[in-house]
Image (tube, rainbow, N blue to C red):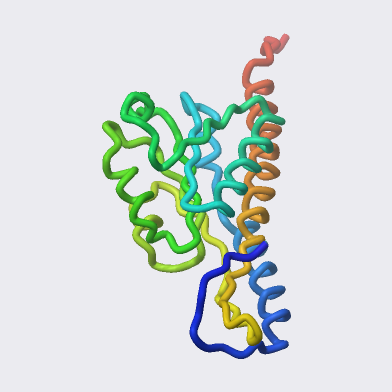
Amino acid sequence: MVKWSTSNVGNFDENEIEYTKNDINLTMSMMMALNLNEFYETLYRANRIFAIASGYTQRNAADELKRNFLTVDKAVFLLDKSAPKSVTNLITKDDILFVYSLSGENEEILNFIDNLKEKPIIASVTKLSNNRLSQISDYSIPFVTHEVFEYESRTKISPVAQFYVVNDFLILKYISFLENHLSLIHILTLPTTPYV
């Protein structure tokens, strides 16, 4: 998957294929190293889960998140950037809002968050950069990507398969969290036998 936008100049470098592979590998390494236990605890206890996206590709990633979390009986409600106040006023501090944005600088998304009556717990998924969305998020889940220039069509593309890599890790690590969490609850609730 790629994100397209027009560009005036550019030559395609064959090394970009290797660079893109490295981006994906770096994203996977970052996800493995990222300690999200506190986030998963918050997710487990969240009242509701919402997701919003800045564009078409990001919306597809949010759809995938929704499908993934259905497997663990968690409903994710997808929102549109132009959702009416009657909908956005339902969002509370006890909810989680996943926000998908490549740049983390999408004005519509930032305005949407700014105009919420009550601020939920925000988990942003953006490319690794010092962007405004990651700065205002409670949990920033970054991935690595870069712009690639294609010579013939004179367009630039940014590979965004990493949105899906992040989604896969989110659900897999959440399932792992559930297994450990439920095991701990089971151990803590076992009846104790008095020593004789």
Location of the C terminus by quadrant is: top right
Query: Image height check: is 117 above or below 162?
Result: above
Above/below status of 106 relative to 16: above
Relative depth, front residue between 182 and 74: 74
The answer to whether 47 appears left or right of 146 in the picture is: left
Whole-percent x, y for residue 168 in the image? 69, 49
Quadrant into which the N terminus falls: bottom right
Residue 110 placement, left or right of 73: left
Q: In the rendered image of this protein, does residue 56 appear above or below residue 72?
A: below
| 62 vs 3, nearest the viewer | 3
**Residue 93's x, y, as percent?**
35, 31
**In this rendering, does residue 93 appear at all?**
no
Residue drawn at the location 33% of the way across and 51% of the way down:
110
- Residue drawn at point x = 46 percent, y = 54 percent: 140
Between 33 and 53, the one nearer to me in the picture: 53
Horizontal arrangement in the rendering, residue 161 relative to residue 114 (left or right):
right
